[in-house]
Amino acid sequence: MCHALLHDPKFLALLLRIDHDLAAQTRADGCPCGGALHRADYPRKPRGCPIEVRRDHSSRLSFCCSVCRRRATSMSVRFLARRVYLALAVVLVSARPGGPTPAAARLGMALGATRRTLARWRVWWCEQFPLTPLWRATCARFMPPLSEVQLPGELITRFAGPAPEALMRLLVWLSPVTVGRGQPVAIKLNEAG
C-alpha cells in the first residue's frame, strides 16, 4: 500500500474536506432536544502528518447544543476515536504484513510511534475492532471472509481501485468507529470540487 499518501498534502486536504462534510451532516441532524448545534472543536496535536498540514488537522470537528449543552462529535476519516495519530497512519502502519516487523517499526518510528504504540494498534485491530458493531454488522459482506488476525491489511485489499481512492473509501467505511457507537450508517459525501 502506498505510504506516500501520509505525506501527500492533496490527499490530506481531501480527508479534511470529507470531515467537514461529515460535520455538516451532524450539524444538520441537530440535537435530539431541538437545540442548535454550535462549533466546539476538540483540540488535537496530530501525529503522523507533515508539518505543513498539521495546523489543518489540529482539531477534531465537534459541536455543543445551545440548550442542553450535550456534545455531538461528527464521524471522522482523519482520526480513529481519541488516537492522536491520523487514521491513515494507523491503518497503513498496522497493515504491514507479518505484524510488527522491522519495516513496520521503521515506518512507525518515522512517524514518531514507539513499538509499544504499534503493538497497541495491532491489539486494537485484532481483538477490539472485531467486537465493534460496525465490524459485526458488515464482516459477513466480505467474501471470502477476512481473517481478523490480518486486519487491517486484508481489509485494505477489499477496497479496490487506485490507492488514494481505496484508502479514502476504507476510511469512510471506518468512520462510524470514530464516534464510539461504531454503528454502520449511510454517509452522504459532497463530491463536488
Image (cartoon, helix red, strand yellow):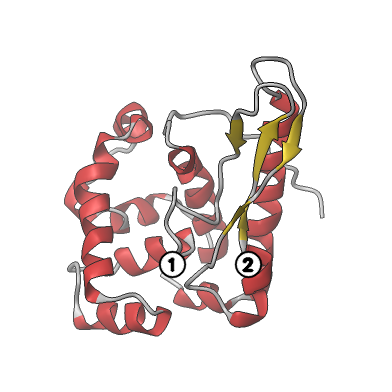
Question: Mark on residue 70?
Answer: none
Question: Mark on residue 11?
Answer: 2
If the image is split into quadrants, where does the C terminus sit? bottom right
Given contact means CB atoms under 8 Å apart, are the residues at marks 2 and 1 in contact?
no
Residue at horizontal 31 percent and vertical 55 percent from the top? 152
Q: Is residue 37 above or below residue 97?
A: above
Q: Secondary structure at mark 1?
A: helix
Q: Secondary structure at mark 2?
A: helix
162 to the left or right of 101: right
Question: Mark on residue 89?
Answer: 1
- The numbered mark, 2 or 1, whose residue comes first in the sequence reads 2
Indicate the amino acid at tag 1. Ala
* Nearer to the camera, 116 or 94: 116
- Where does residue 171 sit, x and y in percent of width and height? 50, 51
Crowding at dot 1, Cα within 10 Å, few <14 / some 14-19 / many 20+, comes out as: many
Q: Is residue 144 visible?
A: no
Indicate the amino acid at tag 2. Phe
Residue at horizontal 19 percent and vertical 46 percent from the top? 127
CA distance separating discs 2 and 1? 13 Å
Q: Is residue 89 visible?
A: yes
* Nearer to the camera, 181 or 6: 181
Q: Quadrant of residue 91?
A: bottom left
Residue at horizontal 62 percent and vertical 58 percent from the top? 59
Q: Quadrant of residue 189?
A: top right
Residue at horizontal 67 percent and vertical 22 percent from the top? 31
Q: Nearer the viewer, mark 2 or mark 1?
A: 1
48 to the left or right of 68: left
If the image is split into quadrants, where does the N terminus sit? bottom left
- Where does residue 169 sit, x and y in percent of width and height? 53, 49
